[in-house]
Image (cartoon, helix red, strand yellow):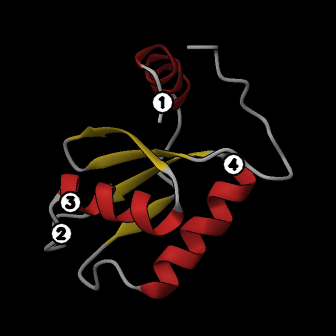
Amino acid sequence: MLSSKQVKYLKALAHPLKPIFQIGKAGLHEPVFSELDAALETRELIKISLLQNTLEDPHEAGARIARETHAELVQVIGRTLVIYRRSKEKQRIDLPRS
């Protein structure tokens, strides 16, 4: 669980990032989760964009992605999600203490 100070820090880091995943009409399914899992291991902090033609609700999709990838949902802005998970091998982000 992230503290409010850590969430604020991650939001600031995520601001300049471009979404690296787009969820479309096919929605969320197992291959998407495995790709997200690999991206989180490499980058730790990612942005995901939900396209207009998806049936997924942004808040529900963010919660499901976080649950399936064992990550934290940092932020939902419109149809953009910010997800964080500490990497096991390549730790790049040093979170502030809570």
Residue 23: x %, y % from top left: 34, 70
Spatial CA distance of label 3 from label 4 is: 23 Å
What element does badge 2 sit on?
loop
**Residue 97 seen by the camera:** yes
The amino acid on which the numbered mark 1 sits, given as a three-letter code, is Leu
What element does badge 1 sit on?
loop
Q: Is residue 4 above or below residue 79?
A: above
Q: Are marks 3 and 4 in contact (CB under 8 Å)?
A: no
Name the residue carrying label 4: 43
Counting residues from the N terminus, which is met first, the one under dot 3 or under dot 4? 4
Q: Is residue 13 above or below residue 44?
A: above
Name the residue carrying label 2: 56
Going by the image, does 73 lie left or right of 33? left
The amino acid on which the numbered mark 4 sits, given as a three-letter code, is Arg
The numbered mark at residue 2 is 1
Q: Residue at x 56, y 25 (%)?
A: 13
Counting residues from the N terminus, which is met first, the one under dot 2 or under dot 1? 1
Q: Is residue 38 above or below residue 5?
A: below
- Which class describes the residues within 10 Å of circle 4: few (<14), some (14-19), or many (20+)? some
Name the residue carrying label 3: 60
Q: Residue at x 78, y 35 (%)?
A: 92
Foreground mark, 3 or 1?
1
Counting residues from the N terminus, which is met first, the one under dot 3 or under dot 1? 1
What element does badge 3 sit on?
helix
Spatial CA distance of label 3 from label 1 is: 19 Å
Foreground mark, 3 or 2?
3
Foreground mark, 4 or 1?
1
